[in-house]
Amino acid sequence: MNSTLSTLDLPVSDADPFSYEVLEDPLPFQADLRDAGPVVFLNKYQVYAMGRYQEVQSALIDWQTFQSAAGVGLSNFRYEKPWRPPSLLLEADPPHHDAPRSVLTKILGPREIGRLAESWAEDAAQLVDELLAKGEQFDAVKDLAAVFPLRVFPDAVGIPKAGRKDLLPYGDHVFNAFGPPNELVAKGASRVGELSASIAANCARHVLTSDGFGARIWAAADKGDITEAQAPLIVRSLLTAGVDTTVNGLAAVLYAFATNPRQWDRLRQNPSLARIAFDEAVRLESPVQTFFRTATRDIEVGGSLIPEGRKILMFLGSANRDPRRWEQPDAFDLDRDPSGHVGFGFGIHQCVGQHIARLEAATVLTALADRVSSIKVSGPTQRHHNNTLRSWESLPVEVKLA
Ligand code: OVM
């Protein structure tokens, strides 16, 4: 490494990626970030940032240099006490990360969850029928994307009915809390104690059904693969990471189709495109926009020095639209191979629930494509601002029955 490298080589930006304007439409900021250089210093938060695909992807693979255990939010756990006990998956590195990860990888594997496909397809058909019975206009977020995951996922984990209403508000706060302590975090503060207690109550062995993901996590503790102290925190990861993400992933693919009628025709002709469509929408919308890493040593990236101990903000959404990597990056195109996108992350922390997310999405898209010949946006759309998630408040659509 060139020891004469200094921060003089480092482009600096005064922009605030967590401001109202950027959360409303992050694309112009992301284009500026990518064009400014492979690594940019964000003055407002005194952190480093990566917005290009190549550097983001390489850093995500290099967990030895870019650690997660100091937190994947702005807060640096080396100096600040985490606001909740850290996740054993998201906020851990090897070796501590590995046992919890391998337990969840098995429980959430594509073959393991295959047994859910049939009943989820029935649930999706029923939900879409209910919706269409009420008329040809509905809210694709409030009536569909935000409803379906809550119908199927809590049952798959095995939690009681009572705790479900807290899942989305808790997730919304957790994803805000990865960002700076701005007004989005402040607005969640009054409920955080109550919501955390509710989530924790749903992680206890005795409240979980005997046949769900939760019970399997506890069974792994009985086997000795993880400890009994780890089991409830691993259930907590499912409840934290499994709902808001899929709601916004579903919203992303529904919005993509509602604004790309030709692609909807293609899906109807070939429903097996549903999975490609979902990954393409995750690439385009990147429901999880950003996560931080922390440098474990001085590291040179693209001619800039990132000093040991410093936070780096990884712009997954920006990497997923980097024209250096993607042809026509802003197009929703079912002919493209979206694999390699970093919307689920990359490397050892890559989304362990991605097969569930794909199954949920394919199930909803199949039910809708069976019944609806067209879908279009029918009124003003509204974003929901979150420090980490690219999210929707409202997405009015009009459909034509097939
Ligand atoms: C966790 C967790 C929380 C939020 C997101 C996430 C996207 C994981 O508690 O493990 O992954």
Image (cartoon, helix red, strand yellow):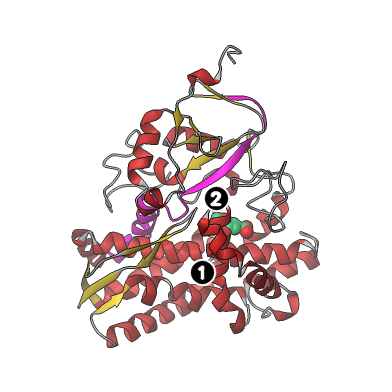
Q: Residues within 10 Å of mark 1 (few under 14, many from 20)?
A: few
Q: Which mark is residue 228?
A: none
Q: Give the residue type that dot 2 points to.
A: Gly
- Considering only vertical position in the picture, is 174 above or below 127? above
Kindly tell me whether residue 193 is visible in this rendering. yes
* Image region (quadrant) for ligand 1: bottom right
Mark nearer the N terminus (2 vs 1): 1
| Residue where numbered disc 1 is placed | 114
The C terminus sits in image quarter: bottom left
- Please tell me which residue lies in front, 33 or 333: 33
| Image location of residue 350, percent across then percent down | 55, 49
Q: Nearer the viewer, residue 92 or 35?
A: 35
The kind of secondary structure element at disc 2 is: loop
Relative to 151, is 93 above or below? above
Secondary structure under the numbered disc 1 in the rendered image: helix
Disc 2 target residue: 179
Q: Quadrant of the N terminus?
A: top right
| Above or below, 399 relative to 96 | below
Please name whichever residue, 373 or 295, is drawn nearer the observer in this view of the structure: 295
Q: Is residue 121 left or right of residue 113?
A: left
Q: Residue at x 74, y 65 (%)?
A: 231
Please give the range of residues in magenta. Answer: 270-299
Q: Which quadrant of the structure image shows residue 131? A: bottom left
Q: Residue at x 66, y 74 (%)?
A: 198
Q: Is residue 108 visible?
A: no
Kindly identify the amino acid type of the residue bearing the numbered disc 1: Gly
Residue 5 percent location from the top left of the image: 56, 15
In reply to whether residue 19 is colored magenta, the answer given is no
Residue at 40 percent across and 78 percent down: it is: 124
In the figure, is residue 49 to the left or right of 368?
right
